[in-house]
Amino acid sequence: MKPRRTRRRAWYIPLGCVVFAFLLVTLLAATYLLLPYQVARVYGPPGENLRGLQRFQYAVLMLWYGESLTQPRDSRAGEATFRVNAGEGATAVAKRLEQEGFIQNAEAFTAYLVYSGLDRSIQAGEFTLSPALAPIQIAQKLQDATPAQIKFVILPGWRLEEVAATLPTSGLNMTPDAFLTEARQPARRFDFLPAGATAEGFLLPGTYTLPRQLTARQLVETLMNNFALALSPELRAAFARQGLSVYQAIILASIVQREAMQAEEQPLIASVFLNRLAAGMRLETDPTVQYAIGLNPATGSWWKSPLALIDLQIDSPYNTYKNDGLPPGPICSPALSAIQAVAYPAQTPYYFFRARCDGSGLHTFAETFEQHVQNACP
């Protein structure tokens, strides 16, 4: 007998299973391709360091963490300072942000940093942050340690060119030339500023907190507005009692500022110049000649010292050795103390002063020229 052949059973896959598998694969492929695109619309594009499956994995994490990344921890909270130390990693920064109450979830924040590629570009420095910011906004702020505002300093006795020279390193986004153009022709007019006058003398010395993106015109107007606020009705009235307009008072205050090394002497020096003006004498003050000379190329200074006898012959309306009365404009930015010294000068009989011989920066005062000569250093 022939052996009976064993019939092999045929395996058939039902059509429904094939369709289901096809749909499942299609769905997974669509999810793999489209999910990162949908996430990018909310959280921005993924960082270049993520490739293939990693992009998909972190896209899923973004959806998982959801509102813990897009909603602030406390929408009513104020601002506070947060410092990132040099060499501090993203994970450590995220943990401290959570500990200090800026964010809700350090793991979610770290995941976003990695997803966006911002984990590699966190800057060391101080930041002004708030729990009222969404974590993704905080992450963006940590990329730039440059503050939105800067401290800008004007020292007493600076002329416009000296203020301009500080701009390249000030943090303000303007050139010295742009500033000088605006300062020499202020767009806004003030009642104390004669037609054609510059801003010289009216940039009140002090430390200003200013927006980094301030324009040159805005800077000049901000500084002059500050001067206008300091110009009280009492000061105006005091200038008038000295027989001076506001503009004339600032001219004289700028001279007092350059002559007085010690603020305590400013009322005395103001009294000397006011006495000279009242007597019809010339002011004969070196700072006005220094202003007329301008920049000394040899030293890089705007205030040549000492002056030579030939310097006193310079042909300039600012040369108070050759011209009567006040110069045509201020020669520098006087401090408020110098302005007040002109408004409320000491009452003295003095017409002369000269520096003491002890190097103290103080002066010896005299009523007569003979006394003045006797006060010369041996």
Image (cartoon, rainbow, N blue to C red):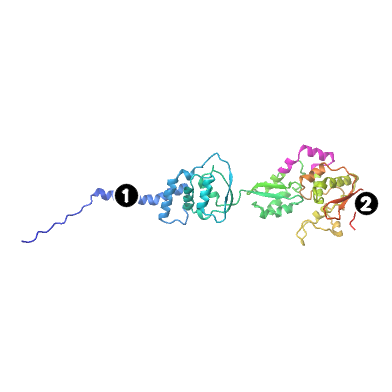
Query: Which stretch is magenta?
Result: 225-247
Dot 1: within a 10 Å radius of its alpha carbon, few (fewer than 14), some, or many (20 or more) residues? few
Q: Is residue 243 magenta?
A: yes
Q: In this view, does 174 lie to the left or right of 233?
A: left
- Choose between 48 and 297: the one closer to the eye: 48
Dot 2: within a 10 Å radius of its alpha carbon, few (fewer than 14), some, or many (20 or more) residues? some
Q: What residue type is labelled 2?
A: Gln
Q: Which numbered tag is attached to residue 371?
A: 2
Q: Is residue 42 left or right of residue 154?
A: left
Q: What residue type is labelled 1?
A: Leu
- Choose between 341 and 229: the one closer to the eye: 341
Q: Which numbered tag is attached to residue 179?
A: none
Task: Identify the image quadrant of residue 78.
Answer: top right
The kind of secondary structure the magenta stretch mainly shows is helix
Q: Which numbered tag is attached to residue 24?
A: 1
Instruction: State the count of labels.
Output: 2
For mark 1, give the secondary structure: helix
Whole-percent x, y for residue 154 in the image: 72, 50
